[in-house]
Amino acid sequence: MPPRKKADPVAPVFDLSQFREAPHYVWREIDREDGEPIRVKLLDLSIRQTNAIPWAGSTPMREIFGHIAPYVAEWDFKAENIETGELVDVPPPSVLGGEVFELLPSAAGTAIAMWLKTPWAMRAADTKKASTPSTSTTEPPNTSD
């Protein structure tokens, strides 16, 4: 009697549209020259979520901010009340929506968008920034060596 041939295994049916990664978050800091950095808690996006963020040169920032608002879970951003001068905590974009980005300095809003759209590039920039400390001096460099 010839040996029995094993049946070919059947690949399981796996519908990717029915799954997503469990939520994970990352904290990022946006440096500001005049004081404390803004700390931002961002959802660590899947490739699918990152690809859904519009990023063409002609895409208005307001549209990008609308797309990324749900991914900004927390921040320690404060804004000044125009009438009282009081600094108040501003709820994050995941609560208020994309329009709240208009209170931020342009560079801070752009940094948050770039962290979500191109995290690998931003991590590389942070690594480079951390490894090349800036120094200032009033003396010219010694070139006589």
Image (cartoon, rainbow, N blue to C red):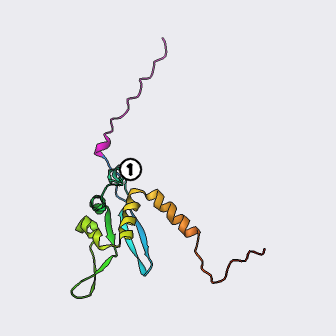
Q: How many discs mark residues in the rendered view?
A: 1
Q: Nearer the viewer, residue 38 or 134?
A: 134
- Image coordinates of residue 105 in percent, x first then y, are 35, 73
Residue sitting at 39 percent across and 74 percent down?
A: 38
Neighbor class of circle 1 (other Cα within 10 Å; few <14, some 14-19, many 20+) is few
**Image quarter in which the C terminus is found:** bottom right
Q: Nearer the viewer, residue 3 or 80?
A: 80
Residue positioned most to the left: 83
Picture layout, residue 77 above or below residue 56: below
Residue sitting at 26 percent across and 70 percent down?
A: 100
Q: Which residues are magenta?
A: 1-18
The answer to whether residue 106 is magenta is no
Image quarter for residue 66?
bottom left
The answer to whether residue 14 is magenta is yes
Q: Nearer the viewer, residue 129 or 47?
A: 129
- Image coordinates of residue 70 in percent, x first then y, are 28, 61
Q: Nearer the viewer, residue 112 or 27?
A: 112
Q: Mainly helix, strand or loop, the magenta region?
A: loop
- Image coordinates of residue 106 in percent, x first then y, are 35, 70
The secondary element bearing badge 1 is classed as: helix
Picture layout, residue 11 above or below residue 79: above
Left or right of residue 106, residue 144 in this image: right
Picture layout, residue 94 above or below residue 38: above
The residue indicated by pointer 1 is: 47
- Image coordinates of residue 108 in percent, x first then y, are 38, 70
Three-letter amino acid code of the residue under disc 1: Ile
